[in-house]
Image (tube, rainbow, N blue to C red):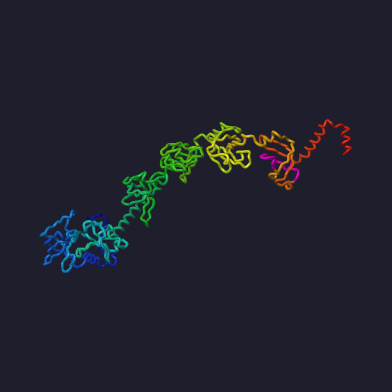
Amino acid sequence: MSNKVNSKVLNKSEIESMDLGDEDNFAAMFEESLKSDKGGSIVKGTIVKIADDEDSILVDVGKKQEGLLYKSEITDSEGNLIFNVGDSLEVAINGYKNERPYLSYKKALKAKKQEEFLASYDENSEEDIIVNGVIIGKNKGGYIVEDEDNLEYFMPRSQAYLKDSNTLIGKKVKAKIIKVDKDSKSIVISRKVLIEAEKEKRKEIVDELLKKDEAINGVVKKITSYGMFVDVGGMDGLVHYSEISYKGPVNPAKHYSEGEEVLVKPISYDETKRHLSLSIKAAQSDPWDELKDQLEVGDAVKVEVSNIEPYGVFVDLGNDIEGFLHVSEISWDKNIKHPKDYLEVGQDVDVDIVELDFEKRKLRVSMKNLLPKPFDEFKSKHRVGEVVKGIVTTTTAFGAFIKIDSVEGLLHNEDISWERGVKCKDLLNVGDEVEVKIIKIDSEKENISLSKKELEESPIQRFATNHSNGDLLTVKVRDKKEFGVFVEIEDGVDALIRLEDLGKSPEEVNIGDELEAAIVFIDSEKHRIRLSVKRVGRIKEQQAMNEFNNDDKNTLGDLIESQLKR
């Protein structure tokens, strides 16, 4: 059935001036296209024979002619014949074979409908007739279109707005009747006129919308992964998912449904793509502007967890403002594996605002800032020199981290053992419980230094039990520095000979050289020994003098005799 709609009516002069391409006689072409071969006339006939074992029946069409009509032309939807022998009916002569006419009942019905339409058509009517049909054929001049009432129309190529191809057969088209020729019984339609009229209407709608620059009501027609199409005044526009909320890109399906009315604002129009862009958030007041007088960095607020990712949590402040809580800001615990172990979607939490950038619309918050600081708690409970137990959490190339209460301290490789070259990873595994001594608490850097070797007797402490200042030793040079040389006294025990105690230029000393030196300083607590080469001579003189003074057998005569012998 043809649809009548109100739109611009083309008068006779406008139709005659239309560019119909090279088809000067398109009506004749259309009429010719209806005739597959000889014939084409409509005649009255009488059914004279119906055979059960044959696909066609005989129809007397006069002039002593009996034509063939396929049974399928006169059967209903259930396959039953709607005519019997002796019944009269109108048929179209499709053509001839061996002088026998081939008939079509359906084509006669179509021709009758065509005549009825032509008879009722009023060319002075102000109503345009819109045709919804399917392309069923084509010729040099254009395309044959048939609607659901089996009416046929001719659409010239210049009015089709289609790229010609064989795939057009069966394509649904919507077009407007632009000319009716009752003499040739042809109806000419144009898809081009309808499309250009719709373009003009769209342009008028867009111009009006952009000119007003106001928020308008629209209806959601279709929702996709990248946004949703909204009908505004008979035209569809796209609300991109980034234009839905001030929070940022959101999934439209979670917030809207098809058929729902929404408030939108036109923001741009691409004439080349005929693409109207709409925005929901632009139709609302900017919540960031409202926030300027309400919050500042350092404020504590209550938020709702809206999304959880491995790297952090997005929190809803309300009024379309979303903040970000980084995984490192959830707890003072540095070993958080995933935020979901601490929080869940929909949970209300108290946070501290640590960054608020209105220009970039960026909000960062922290949970741990509102929690007691583990380092402060540790300082209040522990002191340098205290022996504590902890769990190994990490081993590295430079040492191991030991968790004590809620904080971690560093056990450096040089503090794991008195044995030279031993590293933490050689002795410890993650999860081991270890006893250590607190050797430093750095409040400024919030670092804790630990030692395991200080719980054991050091080689220097053992050395100090058998040696004292003034002892003479033979040592080996292990390392040279600008301020002196380090020497090895025995396995695990090193000492320093300062430059002023060396008695010679450092260039005269090589690594591996043996030196005779005297102990001048032993610090068992700080595990340090200092030696001096220069003092060796004085100590030997003193030792000789002591031996002389302590020898009771020597008499004055013995001494004089000894000197005379010398």
- Seen at 58% across and 42% down, the residue is 398
Q: Quick check: 56 left or right of 527? A: left
Point out the image quarter for the C terminus: top right
Is residue 356 at all visible to an observer of this figure? yes
Where 521 sits versus 111, above or below? Answer: above
State the residue at coordinates (13%, 57%): 83
Range of magenta residues: 486-504
Q: Is residue 179 magenta?
A: no
Residue 128 image offset from top left, x and y in percent = 24, 57
- Image coordinates for residue 420, horizontal then vertical, percent: 63, 41
Residue drawn at point x = 73 percent, y = 35 percent: 469
- The answer to whether residue 108 shows anywhere in this view is no
Q: Position of residue 558 (x, y in %)?
A: 87, 33
Examine the structure image and report whether residue 503 is included in the region drawn in magenta.
yes
Q: Is residue 130 above or below residue 563?
A: below
- Please count the marks in the image: 0
Q: Quadrant of residue 551?
A: top right
Residue 363 is left or right of residue 166, and the answer is: right
User: Which of 409 and 296 lies nearest the eye of the viewer?
Assistant: 409
Quadrant of the drawing holding the N terminus: bottom left
Residue 549 x %, y %: 82, 32
Tell which residue pokes out farthest to the bottom in this image. 98
Q: Is residue 25 left or right of residue 556?
A: left
Q: Give the residue at the far top of this rendering.
A: 552
